[in-house]
Amino acid sequence: MVKKIFAYSYIYIILLILYLPILYLIVFSFTEATTLGSWSGFSLQLYSDLFKNEDVMIALGNTLILACLSALVSTVIGSLGAIGVYYCKRGFRTVIENINQVPVVNAEIVIAMSLTVMFVFMGQNFFGGESIFSFWTLLAGHCVLAIPFVYLNVKPKLLQMDPALYEAAMDLGSSPTKAIHKVIIPQILPGIFSGLLLSFTLSLDDFIVTAFTRGPGLLSGAAQIETLSTLVQSVIKKGAVPPELRALTTIIFLVVLVIVLSYSIYINVKRKRIAKHHRRSLNA
């Protein structure tokens, strides 16, 4: 009993330490005080000011566009790669999985530096010495960062799947593409969705790869692309963080929380339905 109380207390203390700063920001997003920690009464003024701040809105738009596109591209490539590697020979599969681990455990600064060197080399040798840094190099950098994590999310679902399902679909006359679409993807869809959310989150708050690979484009026009992470970094150099960002932090946190909770509820309801259907089948 004592061990159980200690274990639960330890977990709750860790959760409190993790979420207390976020809760602190959320509470003080509902006051007009510009100094964090000062309470001048309940107000939604910061939320109103947030949508009037052009720099923040541009950075938010760039961040969301980049996160959505990189998440989609990374999920498609990572999922198809995981399926392809799963049906390869064991030796080749082991090599690919070991290679996939390198970006996961490697320092992000190494990835950013290597991408920068590659893009500079390409610009000097294939584009007449011009800089090729743009939205596309930034998108490529975020995809390189996220694809290994998508692979790691999809792989467990493939291992749980019956490998004979694909061969059975082929024996029944399905083409390889149709068999993947109708048989494999529905089985690994939870892993694909988890990889999508993770790659979106990785892109949303990335700073190092963004700082090294960005160029002009998107909503920033001819200027360098500003995302929320680079905007906060540049603002901190000059002074305090704009109080409107407290409101933005609250909105992002609540949106992510709703998505995660909705997905968890959906998975639990689906599992209960499957279990209920399974029991009815056994009783029949």
Image (cartoon, rainbow, N blue to C red):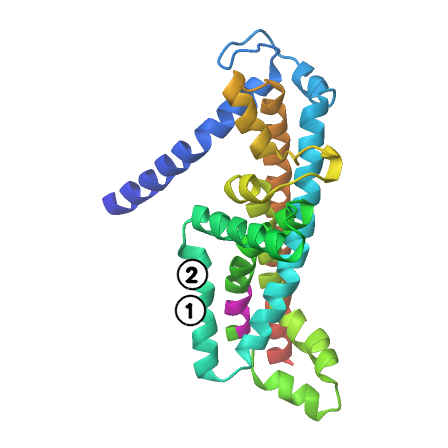
Residue 221 on image: x %, y %: 75, 34
Residue 155 is covered by the magenta coloring:
yes
**Can residue 57 be seen in this snapshot?**
yes
The circle on residue 98 is 1
- For this rendering, which residue is in front, 274 or 10? 10
**Range of the magenta residues?**
154-158
Instruction: For mark 2, give the secondary structure.
Output: helix
Q: Which residue is outermost to the bottom?
A: 171
- Residue visible at 58% across and 52% down in the picture: 119
Residue 65 is left or right of residue 202, and the answer is right
Residue 112 on image: x %, y %: 50, 48
Residue 27 is covered by the magenta coloring:
no
Neighbor class of circle 2 (other Cα within 10 Å; few <14, some 14-19, many 20+) is: few
Residue that mark 2 sits on? 102
CB atoms of marks 2 and 1 within 8 Å: yes
Residue 273 is left or right of residue 104, and the answer is right
Neighbor class of circle 1 (other Cα within 10 Å; few <14, some 14-19, many 20+) is: few
- For this rendering, which residue is in front, 166 or 119? 119
Instruction: For mark 1, give the secondary structure.
Output: helix
Q: Which residue is outermost to the top?
A: 40
Residue 105 on image: x %, y %: 40, 55
Residue 195 is left or right of residue 18, and the answer is right
Residue 196 vertical placement versus 281 (above, below) = above
Q: Quadrant of residue 40?
A: top right
- Residue visible at 50% across and 74% down in the picture: 159
Q: Amino acid at mark 1?
A: Asn
**Can residue 269 be seen in this snapshot?**
no
- Residue visible at 63% across and 60% down in the picture: 75
- For this rendering, which residue is in front, 163 or 52? 52
- For this rendering, which residue is in front, 7 or 212? 212
